[in-house]
Image (cartoon, grey):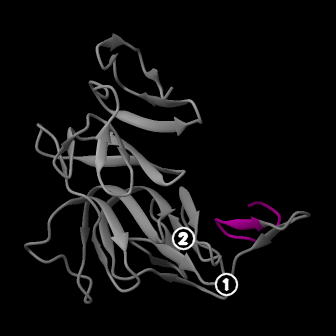
Amino acid sequence: TEGDGSAGIALWDGQALQPLGQGLGGDVDQVAVSPDGEVFAIGAALTLDGERVQGVAAFDGAAWSRKGTAITGVLNDLAWYDGQLLVAGSFARVTDADGNVPSDAPFESLLTWDGTSWSRFAELEHELGYTFVERLVPWEDGLYLTGLFDHVDGAPAHGLAWFDGAAYHDLGGGVDDLALDVAPAPDAVWVAGAFRLAGDTPSHGVARWDLE
C-alpha cells in the first residue's frame, strides 16, 4: 500500500498498516490465513524477490516463500478449510520438483495442500469438457463453491455446490450458467454470476436460496 513501506500486501495491527516481510510484487488478488497465523496469497503475475511465484505464496511470520511446487494456469481463490489450504483455479496443473509439468498431469479446478504436496480435493465435471472453480467460502462446518461445473465428485451440482464435510450437494438445481460468487447467511445463500435461471426461476445474475 502506498506510503507505508509495504509491497503488495500489509497487515493492519489496529493502529497502522504494517509490512509483511519483504512483501510481494505484482497484484495480490486473494489471501487466506491459517489458525496459526500463516498467510497465503495468490495473484496475477505475483513475484517474490523479482521471480514469478507461479502458485501460492506463503508468509510464515518471518519470510515469504512459494508453497510447494509451482501451479500453472489461473488461480481464482483460496481458503483455509477443515485444517487445510484449498486453492481454486482454471486449467491448473501441478509441476514437478524441477518446475516441469508432467505430460500426464491433469487439469485441476480445486487443489489442497497436505503439508507436503498439492493434490486434488474434488473432481469436477461439466458437459463442455472443462471446469473451473471461481469462489470458495467456508461456512460453519462446510464449504460453498461456485464456478463452471455440473457434477462434483459425482454429485449433480450446477455452478453452485455445498460440501458438508463428507459429500457435495446441489442447491435447488443450481444455475444455468457461470456462478461467480456466493454469500451465505444463517437463513439463506446468495449467489451472483452470469446466469439467467436459478433452478427453474428466472434470476438475472443474482439469486437467493432459502435455507429455512
Predominant SS along the magenta part: loop
Q: Residue at x 34, y 12 (%)?
A: 201
Give the image location of residue 62, x and y in percent: 67, 88
Residue 7 among those drawn in magenta: yes
Crowding around mark 2 (Cα neighbors within 10 Å: few <14, some 14 to 19, many 20+) is many
Look at mark 2 in the image and give the residue it sits on. 40
User: At numbered mark 2, what does the secondary structure look like: helix, strand or loop?
Assistant: strand
114 or 141, nearer to the observer:
141
Q: Is residue 143 left or right of residue 160?
A: right
Q: Which mark is residue 184?
A: none
Identify the residue shown where x is 14% and y is 71%: 105
Nearer to the camera, 171 or 137:
171
Q: Crowding near pointer 1: few (<14 within 10 Å), some, many (20+)?
A: few
Magenta segment: 1-11
Residue ID for mark 1: 61
| Residue 176, x across and y down, in percent | 26, 24
